[in-house]
Amino acid sequence: MTTSGQPPERLGARSLDPHLGRYAARAAGMTASEVRALFAVASRPEVVSLAGGMPNLAALPLESLSSQIGQIIAEEGLTALQYGSAHGVPLLREQICEVMALEGVVGHPDDLVVTVGSQMALDLVTRIFCDPGDIVLAEGPSYVGALGTFASYQADVRHVAMDEHGLQPEALRAALAAAARAGRRVKFLYTIPNFNNPAGVTMAVSRRAEVLDICARHDVLVIEDNPYGLLGFDGQIYPALRSMDADNVIYLGSFSKTFASGLRVGWALAPHAVREKLVLAAESAALCAPTLNQMVVSRYLATHDWKGQIKSFQTMYRERRDALLTGLEQHMPAGCTWTRPDGGFFVWLTVPEGVDTKAMQPRAVTARVAYVPGTGFYADGFGSRQMRLSFCYPPPERISEGVRRLAGVLAQELDLLNTFGPTTSRALSGPQTPTPDTA
Amino acid sequence: MTDRWVAVLAGGLSHERDVSLRSGRRVSAALRSVGVTVEEWDADAGLLPRLRKHRPDAVVIALHGGEGENGSIQTILELLGVPYVGADADACRRAWDKPSAKAELRRAGLLTPDWVVLPQSAFRELGAQPVLDAMVERLGLPMMLKPDQSGSALGAQVVREAAQLPTAMVGSLAYSDAVLAERFIHGVEVAVTVIDGPDGPTALPAVEIAPETGVYDYTARYTAGLTTFHTPARLDPDTAAKVADLAVAAHRLLGLRDVSRTDAVVSAEGDVYFLEVNLSPGLTETSLVPMAFEAAGLSFGTTYAGLVDRAIARAIPAP
């Protein structure tokens, strides 16, 4: 007899999730993901990760920051460790206005709400403007965190095409016209005009007024997400959309790329009429952004050469961008194209027709290189021929090695393509992009 | 039992790293709960120096895929003379390769779905379409495609129409250099855990798997709620016994040791088909082996501590 000696305990039918019948419809896509599981390997040092978007913090003055944080606790601990207002620490709001002034933004500290990263600001904006089914326009491709937020509010995302000069005004007009024909209301345009994540392109200055004008004429609000604006590799700073239209643009900013992502300090600068709703929404979401973290940022801005620090980030990221672009020139097979960012963290690579970057990902992991398949940056399943390559974290020599490995993977994939012919993208469930702490 | 100290190996660089880390955390917690001292180690370049320096009483391998299951880690542990739970290196090499394991069982007269295994180069050199056509002719549709060496259902797909085959091939070949194509058997999918005890290998109650989508893929495996498990499986006593016999036979024929999990399917006619065997089965919160332990009234921690003791005992030469 081969079964266990005692009669089995009859456990019956189990789903392992007793809450299954209780979830909201918006939780339907929140499942384990084969694609995401592969990113677990990306964090290993053997793998060259061109996948994550973690800023490189190695150049920060850690010793001095450490002593300042100690000082804040010692001198103002009872304030720093206490609840604050949902509006944000007043001094920090004034300082943020000075930071934004570099991009031509004239804002009043009262119209600014400090948030837990600009991700929370985006959540608040979507919360107060979007009902389920409302149309939101976003560049194609767009930031995966924004797409996740829009999905959680059940917004209907329509992508607007970009080219090397960013969002195309004609495509914007066409998207608005299509929505009008369908009798649908577009609530806002979400754009990352500078050094777009994931596309790496920047909206041409000459297009900015036109985009704003189109949106104003169609009564569509503009959400300008600008985490990378100060990371132009030649020190160039583009005028913010908000600087050109204070009444119809909500500006989202962040210290995650210019200082420390782990502090989670970001903000929204809104037209005065919107401000009150944002503050109340922030209060119900988180009560307030962490007071200590806001004070740390404030002290840093007041006492450190933060502009000099940003310059050193620019230099570091430029070297890494150069390593990536050089590697792509040297190793990529015919039929590949890619963007050439002049700031930020990302290059958007398009591979030859018929290659599916999501299907190729396990092969890349075997070859010890990681990237993010393009489908994660679209709400409509597009992007199977694209991938995001991030150059922010690995040093230049590792980036070069990573591109060399990627070229080998692509060669194998092209061999498969020659063998089996063009394939359709395989449907896989769950998130298609890495967690925030993936290097 | 309480004076043992054990290194649990988890992580590694295979495609199943994420699952392995979860298995490692779960078995570590179970062992700690019965007083075993546990350290969790990744399988990386630091592993050998760590093994030499700290020399645990035994190693529990919670690695899935690649070096953890193909006999490599087992060979290293044997070289160093460190006792470990699980099959030895030779058995791993046989069982990890799915076609080899199927062939072994077929030779012994057991049922396994008809199959073909082909490397990528065969399609390239002979032309994909004629080969795919021949596969459909032989195996029919739907057909199961999977990498010949992989786990957690990564790259595994049910192909229902011939037009889907090229895409499915590309998906499976991304994980391995060869693909295993099997005739798809409609029926009840079950998993049977086998544990070695003083009286030899024993099958625990079978767990019946009923995925919501009909396919027990990666998402269905690791998202709580997407699959309903019936423990024990809703089988009549004769079929339940046949399923248990198959799992024990697979365990014996492939030379497995300590613990294994056999996946099988019971056809509408009541025939039991061997699908594959897992020599380092998943131990996560949604995995099948812990469910089988529970159904058998076994404590996860005590059972694994017992396997650790067995590993240590067999490493000590008889006087």
Image (cartoon, coloured by chain):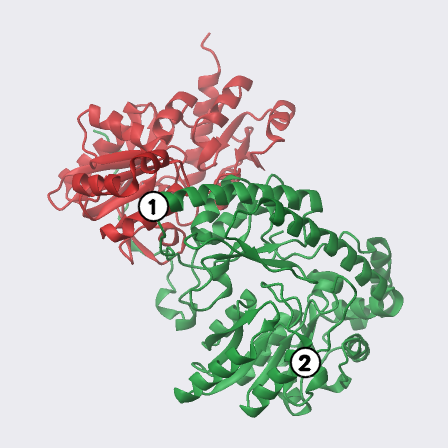
Chain colours: A green, B red
Dots 1 and 2: beta carbons under 8 Å? no
Figure disc tally: 2
Q: In which quarter of the image is residue A166?
A: bottom right
- In this rendering, the answer to whether A164 lies above or below B229 is below
Assign a secondary structure to mark 1.
helix
Within 10 angstroms of label 1, few (less than 14), some, or many (20 or more) residues? many
Residue pictured at 37% horizontal, 57% vertical? A427
Q: Where is residue A290 in the image (x, y as percent from the top left)?
A: 71, 70
As measured in the structure, the alpha-carbon distance from the residue carrying label 1 to the one carrying label 2 is: 47 Å
Decide which of A119, A280 is in the foreground and name it: A119
Residue pointed to by mark 2: A241
Q: Which mark is residue A420?
A: 1
Decide which of B262, A51 is in the foreground and name it: A51
Name the mark nearer the viewer: 1 or 2.
1
Decide which of A195, B127 is in the foreground and name it: B127
- In this rendering, the answer to whether A296 lies above or below B144 is below
Q: Which residue lies furthest to the top in this view?
A: B319
Q: Residue furthest front?
A: A334
Q: Mark 2 lies on which chain?
A: A
Residue pictured at 64% horizontal, 59% vertical? A340
Amino acid type, label 2? Leu
Assign a secondary structure to mark 2.
helix
Residue pictured at 63% horizontal, 88% vertical? A248
- In this rendering, the answer to whether B287 lies above or below B98 is below
Amino acid type, label 1? Phe
Q: Which tag, 1 or 2, sits closer to the chain's start?
A: 2
Q: Mark 1 lies on which chain?
A: A
Q: Where is residue A370 in the image (x, y as percent from the top left)?
A: 55, 48
